[in-house]
Image (spheres, coloured by chain):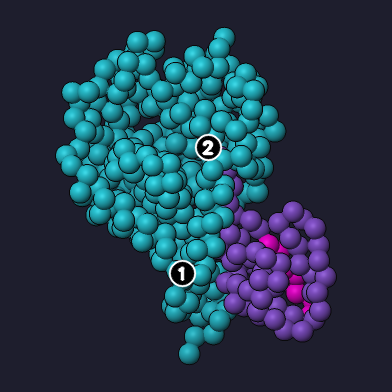
Chain colours: A purple, B cyan
Amino acid sequence: MQVILPDKTVVTRGDDPVPIESILHDLGILPASVIVLKNGKVVPEDVIASGDDQIRIIRIAHGG
Amino acid sequence: MVEADRCSFCQEPAVIRGREQAERWCASHLAVHLEDRVREHIRENSLVSPGDHIAVALSGGKDSTALLLILTLLIPEWKEVSITAITVDEGIAEYRDETIESAVSITRHLGIRHHIISFPDLFGADLDTLIRRSGSGERACTICGVLRRKALAEAARMIGATKIATGHNLDDEAQSVLMNVLRGDLVRLVQDSSSGEPDCFIPRIKPLARITEKEVVAYLFVRDSYSELPECPYAGSALRSEIRSMLGRLEYRHPGTREALLRSQAAIRKQGGPPASSEGVRRCGRCGTLCNSEICQACRILESLGP
C-alpha cells in the first residue's frame, strides 16, 4: 500500500492488513495531530488498511 | 457490536471516533454533533444575546472558517443577531495572501459582510518589516499577537460590533492555560475576556472552545470546506509550538488532559477575586485606545521596534 506523508513524500508498505494507527505509530505521528484519508475518504485511525489502499496523512496543527 | 469503520448511529462509514472509542460518527452525524455542541456551549455560557452584532475574526484558516460556517447556521435561531467577518492582513509573504483569498471566497459563498484591515493601514508597516526591525523572528508571535488583537478590536469598533468571536478550539485553550502557567502569567490565566470586563472593552467569545482541533478539521472535510493552506512561516519559533507537541503527547497517553487544564483554570478563576473594574482603565498616551497602563502594549511594541 501507498502512504502519503504530510510533506507529500510517498512511502510504500507491505500489503498485509494493519490498523492505520499502527502505521502512524511506526512513523512517530500522533493520531490527534493528523487527519487520515483512506482511498480519498476521511476515516478513524483504527480502520484497517491493506493491499492497494492509498493512505494520505494530513497534518492539522498550523500556526496563525 | 459496532464495526470499526461504521457510524454508531446509522452504520454509514465513520469519519472520526470519540476519545473513549465507544462512539464513531459518519459525515452527517459528525456535522450535527459538532453544531449541537457549539450551540450548547454558546447557550450555557450566554455568549450571544439578542441584538448582538458579532464580528467574526476570519483569518481564512481552518478554525475561523469552521466558526463562520457554524455561526452562519446558528444565526437564524437567535433574535436580531447579525455577523460581519473581519480579516486582519498582517502582511506575511507567501502565507497571508492565500488565506485571505480563502476568507474572501467563504464570505462570498455564505453571503456574509466582510471587512479587511491591514497592518500597514494601522501601524504603517507590515509584519515582515516589523520582524526585520526587531532583528529576530523569536518575538514574531508576540508582536503579531498583540498587534492583531489591536487591529481586530479597532475593526470591530469601526463596524459597531458588540462581540468579537474567535475560532480558538479546545487544543488552543488548553495550550494557553499551560503557556500562562509556564510564564507565571497569573493575570492572563484568570482573565476571562468573554465577560467584556472592564465593561468598556468589546467581549471576546470563543464558540469552538470545547471542540478539538481534529474535530474542527474533520468538520471542514465533511462540509466540503477544507483547503490545504500554507503554514505561517513564524509559527515554528513560538513557545506555543513546543507546548502543542507536548500537550499532544500527554493527551494521547492520558486522555482528558486538555479538559483537566481548562477545569483547573476555571477553579483558579473562581478563587481569583472580583473581576477587573473599569477604574484602572485609561487611554493610551500614544494612540488613545483604552488600556490598563499609560501606554498600550501595541504602542510599546511599535516604539521598541523604532521608526
Instruction: Find residue B255 and report its image quarter.
Output: bottom left
Dot 2: within a 10 Å radius of its alpha carbon, few (fewer than 14), some, or many (20 or more) residues? many
Q: Are dots 1 and 2 on a single chain?
A: yes
Could you tell whether B63 is left or right of B278 in the image?
Answer: right
Q: Is residue B201 visible?
A: yes
Residue drawn where x is 66% and y is 76% of the image: A22
Q: Looking at the picture, does residue B48 appear above or below residue B288?
A: below
Q: Of callouts 1 and 2, which one flags the residue occurring earlier in the amino acid sequence? A: 2
Task: Please tell me whether residue A59 belongs to the stretch shown in magenta.
Answer: no
Pointer 2 residue: B59
Q: Position of residue B281 (x, y in %)?
A: 25, 22
Could you tell whether B148 is left or right of B296 in the image?
Answer: right
Look at the numbered disc 1 and give the secondary structure of its residue: loop
Q: Looking at the picture, does residue B4 appear above or below residue B183?
A: below
Q: CA distance from mark 1 to mark 2?
A: 32 Å
Pointer 1 residue: B254
Magenta range: A51-57
Residue closest to the eye, B148 or B34: B148
Q: Position of residue B120 (x, y in %)?
A: 56, 17
Amino acid type of the residue that numbered disc 1 sits on in the rendered structure: His
Instruction: Find residue A44 and report its image quarter.
Output: bottom right
Q: Looking at the picture, does residue B18 appear above or below residue B215?
A: below
Look at the numbered disc 2 and give the secondary structure of its residue: loop
Circle 1 or circle 2, nearest the eye: 1
Q: Is residue B39 visible?
A: no
Q: Position of residue B216 (x, y in %)?
A: 50, 55
Q: Position of residue B257 (x, y in %)?
A: 42, 63
Residue closest to the eye, B260 or B101: B260
Q: Chain of mark 2?
A: B
Q: Looking at the picture, does residue A12 appear above or below residue B37?
A: below
